[in-house]
Image (cartoon, rainbow, N blue to C red):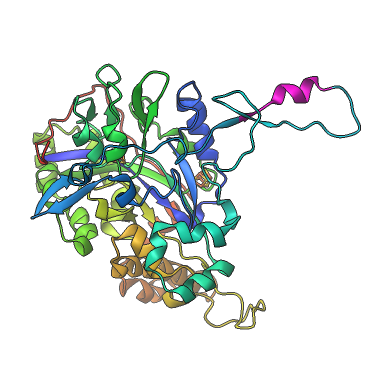
Amino acid sequence: MVRAQISMVMVLDKCIGCHTCSLTCKHVWTNREGQEYAWWNNVETRPGVGYPKRWEDQEKYGGGWVLENGKLRLRLEAMGKRDPPSIKDYYQPFEYNYEELFTEEIRDQQPAANPINMYTGEEMDVKWGPNWDDDLAGANIYAGMDPNWRILEKEIYLNFKDVFMFYLPRICNHCLNPSCLYACPRKSIYKREEDGVVLIDQTRCRGYRYCVTACPYKKVYYNWKTGKSEKCILCYPRLETGQATVCTVSCVGKIRYMGVVLYDEERVIEAASAPENELVKAQRDLILDPFDPDVIRQAKADGIPENFIKAAQESPVYYMFKRWEIALPLHPEFRTLPMVFYVPPLNPVITALDRRGKYNAAYENIIPTIDELRIPIKYLASMFSAGNEEEVRKALKKLVAIREFFRLVNVEGMSKTEASRVLSEHGLSVRDADLMYKWLALGRDRWTIPTRKVELRMKIPKRASR
Ligand code: SF4
Ligand code: SF4
């Protein structure tokens, strides 16, 4: 059975951590009572603790799936764990008393707007927030609390303190095997047949919060005012009219790309049950080639409209995840088959400093080798490939190859055909390079969203203990 999914890729080298995406999302969807603490889109600093604190630690939170005797089981069932995170794990939301700024009498000092606890209405001392460790502020304290960090050697940690960081924007991954959906005893959560968006039916939800525990990304939020759970809806009213999500459109760094991918629904369980170091490959194998005449024929037979097939052929997500293999899923070991992908950061992109730290324009290896990069591959592999370092290396090498290619052409004056040797050893063509340049460097045509009219609930096969 061929299905269509609207997915996203985020290119981490381009994220500047401005939080515009979080703010636009907040203003459109969660700027209301009951959702004060909720950031459907949040941006974290890495290495760091994340939001809610240490969300990646499933021993603590019990999210995602485990493979038991070759069968998938919700981790919350396997652990007998039901407790969702508490407000302490998120943060105490606060506002500023802006009113005071306008009404204060004229004094010698500037007036200050003190933070006010949004729950108690009292002034408060802010001690934690959704991105508290922003810009390495206190990294030597917080980086060690990053669950990905435990796998690294001490000396790397010591080097890290001086040098590396990157931002990690996160939304709901609209997973192909969503543990939130299977954990819901009311069957309130469903995946839309036409585009794979995962939604919570507010009329059915009774606020049991199993979904909050079961989502390993902690992207379901309980609304204390309505007594129901809520989550990112991938701006589906915008998608239906062919527009990208608010976070994508407002992204200052143009790091977000959206498009359709076609996948084989019957092989979802098989892919989610793959051995840990093969999970990325198994998820890639699920994605179908939208140019293949057999796939097109089957997609049409399965009711996928023409405009979705065309959008899949032009989809940046298809190219980046499947064809070029430069994008990776976040924590595939949670086995939910997340459909938001990340192009890992190179950091730094070029080596312009010599070994003494002086700027050197004549530096021969202006493009660094993969092992000269600051971010340990092991750390990236812990986040994006269930520890499979080869997947990360492969992606980074291609990103470097593209830069080398354009440097040879634009700086050294080589012809594209001559320079293409640096591409071909990574399975890339000049056309691939031009397309990457258009999407990644210029940020043009970043989304292809087909319009549609109906909303159908996908009939998902029973595949777990529920
Ligand atoms: S990220 Fe979490 S909330 Fe979103 S679909 Fe996956 S399991 Fe569900
Ligand atoms: S708006 Fe874009 S660049 Fe700014 S933090 Fe969000 S993802 Fe990063």
Which quarter of the image is occupied by the N terminus? top left
Q: Residue at x 59, y 31 (%)?
A: 94
Q: Quadrant of residue 323?
A: bottom left
Residue 383 in picture, x, y percent from top left: 36, 58
Picture mark count: 0
Residue 33 in picture, x, y percent from top left: 49, 20
Residue 296 in picture, x, y percent from top left: 14, 43
**Residue 207 visible here:** yes
In the displayed structure, would residue 257 be above or below residue 455? below
Q: Residue at x 48, y 55 (%)?
A: 48
Chief secondary structure of the magenta portion = helix
In the displayed structure, would residue 197 be above or below residue 438? above
Q: Quadrant of residue 358?
A: bottom right
With 367 as the anchor, is 204 left or right in this view? left
Q: Nearer the viewer, residue 278 or 103?
A: 103
**Range shown magenta:** 95-104
